[in-house]
Image: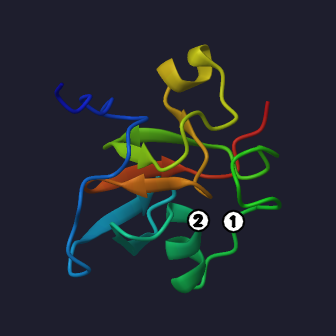
């Protein structure tokens, strides 16, 4: 039996060294370091930003953002997003880990 292949968005993050730090850029122009082992929300807060958040476990959707470039992974099987939202690039930064450099639109409202 072989190990299942992780979905590139929903699968567990690959093993990474703590030194893997990417760049997150907001469409507004601000940038911050985004370590592979921290959710994007936490990385933004470490950089002094104050994005909206509440539950921090992928259910309340307060932190919903749009990923306009790059890719993330989730450590939970299915965060609180519909398939349509995921297809349109929406993510939940509280549980999304960067796989590389990313560009985000924070504070998305519907």
Q: On screen, 77 above or below 105?
A: above
On the rendered structure, is 21 left or right of 57?
left
Q: Position of residue 30 (x, y in %)?
A: 46, 69
Q: Mark number for residue 41? A: 2
Local secondary structure at mark 2: helix
Q: Which residue is mark 1?
A: 51
On the rendered structure, is 39 left or right of 15?
right
Q: Position of residue 54 (x, y in %)?
A: 83, 61
Quadrant in which the N terminus is drawn? top left
Residue at 30%, 33% in the rendered image: 6
Q: On screen, 72 above or below 81?
A: below
Per the model, the C-alpha gap separating discs 2 and 1 is 7 Å
Q: Mark number for residue 73? A: none
In front: mark 2 or mark 1? 2
Tell which of 42 and 49 is nearer to you: 42
Local secondary structure at mark 1: loop
Residue at 62%, 77% in the rendered image: 49
Q: On screen, 32 above or below 83?
A: below
Q: Position of residue 29 (x, y in %)?
A: 44, 62
Quadrant in which the C terminus is drawn? top right
> Where is residue 15, by image quadrant?
bottom left
Q: Are marks 2 and 1 in contact (CB under 8 Å)?
A: yes
Q: On screen, 10 above or below 53?
A: above
Tell which of 8 and 90 is nearer to you: 8
On the rendered structure, is 48 left or right of 100?
right
Residue at 59%, 33% in the rendered image: 78
Q: Position of residue 60 (x, y in %)?
A: 82, 46
Local packing at callout 1 (Cα closer than 10 Å; few below 14, some 14-19, many 20+) is: some
Local packing at callout 2 (Cα closer than 10 Å; few below 14, some 14-19, many 20+) is: many
On the rendered structure, is 77 left or right of 100?
right
Sequence-wise, which precedes: disc 2 or disc 1? 2
> Where is residue 8, by image quadrant?
top left
């Amino acid at each position: 039996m072989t190990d299942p292949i992780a979905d590139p968005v929903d699968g567990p993050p690959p093993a990474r060294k703590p030194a893997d730090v990417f760049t997150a850029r907001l469409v507004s122009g601000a940038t911050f370091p985004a370590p592979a082992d921290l959710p994007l929300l936490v990385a933004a807060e470490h950089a002094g930003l104050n994005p909206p958040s509440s539950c921090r476990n992928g259910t309340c959707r307060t932190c919903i953002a749009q990923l306009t470039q790059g890719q993330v992974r989730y450590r939970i099987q299915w965060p609180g997003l519909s398939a349509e939202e995921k297809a349109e690039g929406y993510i939940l930064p509280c549980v999304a880990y960067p796989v590389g450099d990313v560009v985000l639109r924070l504070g998305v409202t519907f």
